[in-house]
């Protein structure tokens, strides 16, 4: 055992601040990567120029460590959105920043997919679900546009080193039960603020058995329990994923929590008997076993978002639906999380299969997840989504109702027009 055992979060902040630190300390930390998008980016750019107003050269701290992505309003759905896109294109061009523009998809899929994150990194993004990159062993967290402006100017940001809750999960998930069901179960157990300003560390044999796609779902939703980050320690699965994206990548063994590290809490779960889970309106921690909500009629099913819009999720949807059509009166929207994931689904024949079934398959973007430009629910309508939030008005009318579930649960709802246990298909 180390003389000074640390959690992985403490190790990352120690590296970033240049000294050994523990949870509860305040540090000025060096940022490894900063991400902003078309909604929060324009405010961050304004703030950056305000900070730099008295400097002769108004340059960002390191353009190679900054990424811009357009994903919330793409292609531009209003004159205001078009103006924001123009502003960010100009900023990226002048500063030499990588801009994925409208072409690549949702930021939280594109950033890891393109090899921008590795274990041990400290990453900030001006979007709350930036915690998704913790699936690769990074400490990754969302910040506001003002904080992002400070990062663009200095490459540094103040943090309070968070305490860590360790979730140790054992047991083999049943057929058609996935990591979305697991994370909803954890959120329902801990509550919407149960991990407020803490690092959620997911561990145990069940988590280790998950592929990167399902790990991303887990880390993505740490914020729904109030978490600052959702971290899964690196392993061979991480290494294989990153070697395909970062030439010569090798794991650094230090990026793991030490035996004897101090945790705020260690919570243990056996999920062998876990049934599919559903988050009910209007809060993500209002989680119930699917047996308690079966039969709820739905008007729309949305499969996509940074939480469950990857090829693996679309494959689950397509395989469970088979040759059956979407239920009468139900709208099925399928929105891959990135262009890469879209092309995988296209090559596999799933896009044609789903469209033949009556689905609408859109190009990669956030879609209705944040009250976007299409796919909104009207007054009194009910939606089942694979996304991460079901707040009142999140996907359209404040008088609509959103349930959250896995791609398998979404497939069953699309087939039967009501919430149905996918294990029965």
Image (tube, rainbow, N blue to C red):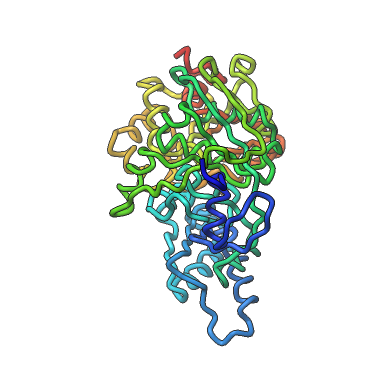
**Between 376 and 120, the one nearer to me in the picture:** 120
Across and down, in percent, residue 79 comes to: 57, 63
Asked if residue 363 can be seen in this view, the reply is yes
Q: Residue furthest bottom?
A: 56
Between 396 and 240, the residue placed more toward the observer is 240
Vertical position of residue 160 compared to residue 416: above or below: below
Quadrant (top left/top right/bottom left/bottom right) for the C terminus: top left
- Location of residue 279 in the rendering, given as x and y in whole percent from the top left corner: 63, 28
Q: What residue is drawn where x is 52% and y is 22%?
A: 413
The residue at 52%/44% (across/down) is 2
Residue at left 52%, top 46%? 366
Residue 358 location (% of width, % of height):
42, 29
Q: How many marks?
A: 0
Is residue 110 visible to us here?
no
Q: Residue 378: image x %, image y %?
A: 64, 36
**Quarter holding residue 25:** bottom right
């Amino acid at each position: 055992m180390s003389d000074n055992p640390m959690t992985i979060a403490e190790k990352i902040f120690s590296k970033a601040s240049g000294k050994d630190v523990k949870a509860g300390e305040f540090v000025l930390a060096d940022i490894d990567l900063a991400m902003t998008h078309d909604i929060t980016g324009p405010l961050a750019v304004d703030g950056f120029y305000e900070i730099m107003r008295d400097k002769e050269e108004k340059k960002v701290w390191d353009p190679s460590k900054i990424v811009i992505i357009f994903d919330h309003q793409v292609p531009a759905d209003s004159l205001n959105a078009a103006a924001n896109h123009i502003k960010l294109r100009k900023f990226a061009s002048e500063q030499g920043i990588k801009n994925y523009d409208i072409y690549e998809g949702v930021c939280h899929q594109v950033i890891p997919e393109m090899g921008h994150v590795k274990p041990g990194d400290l990453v900030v993004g001006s979007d709350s679900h930036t915690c998704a990159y913790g699936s690769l062993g990074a400490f990754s967290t969302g910040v506001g546009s003002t904080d992002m402006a400070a990062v663009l100017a200095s490459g540094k940001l103040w943090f309070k080193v968070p305490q860590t809750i360790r979730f140790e999960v054992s047991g083999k998930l049943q057929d058609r039960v996935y990591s979305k069901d697991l994370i909803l179960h954890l959120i329902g157990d801990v509550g919407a603020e149960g991990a407020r300003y803490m690092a959620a560390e997911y561990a145990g044999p069940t988590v280790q058995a998950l592929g990167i796609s399902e790990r991303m779902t887990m880390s993505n939703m740490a914020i729904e329990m109030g978490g600052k980050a959702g971290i899964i320690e690196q392993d061979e699965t991480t290494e294989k994923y990153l070697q395909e994206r970062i030439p010569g990548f090798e794991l650094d063994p230090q990026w793991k929590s030490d035996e004897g590290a101090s945790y705020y809490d260690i919570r243990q779960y056996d999920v062998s008997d876990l049934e599919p889970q559903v988050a009910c309106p209007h809060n993500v921690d209002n989680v119930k076993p699917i047996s308690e909500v079966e039969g709820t009629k739905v008007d729309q099913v949305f499969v996509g978002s940074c939480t469950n819009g990857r090829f693996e999720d679309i494959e689950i949807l397509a395989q469970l639906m088979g040759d059956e059509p979407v239920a009468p009166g139900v709208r099925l929207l399928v929105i891959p999380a990135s262009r890469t994931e879209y092309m995988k689904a296209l090559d596999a024949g799933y896009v044609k299969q789903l469209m033949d079934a009556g689905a609408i398959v859109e190009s990669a973007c956030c879609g209705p997840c944040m009250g976007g430009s299409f796919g909104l629910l009207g007054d009194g309508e009910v939606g089942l989504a694979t996304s991460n939030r079901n707040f009142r008005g999140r996907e359209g009318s404040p008088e609509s109702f959103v349930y959250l579930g896995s791609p398998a649960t979404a497939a069953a709802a699309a087939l039967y027009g009501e919430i149905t246990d996918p294990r029965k298909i």
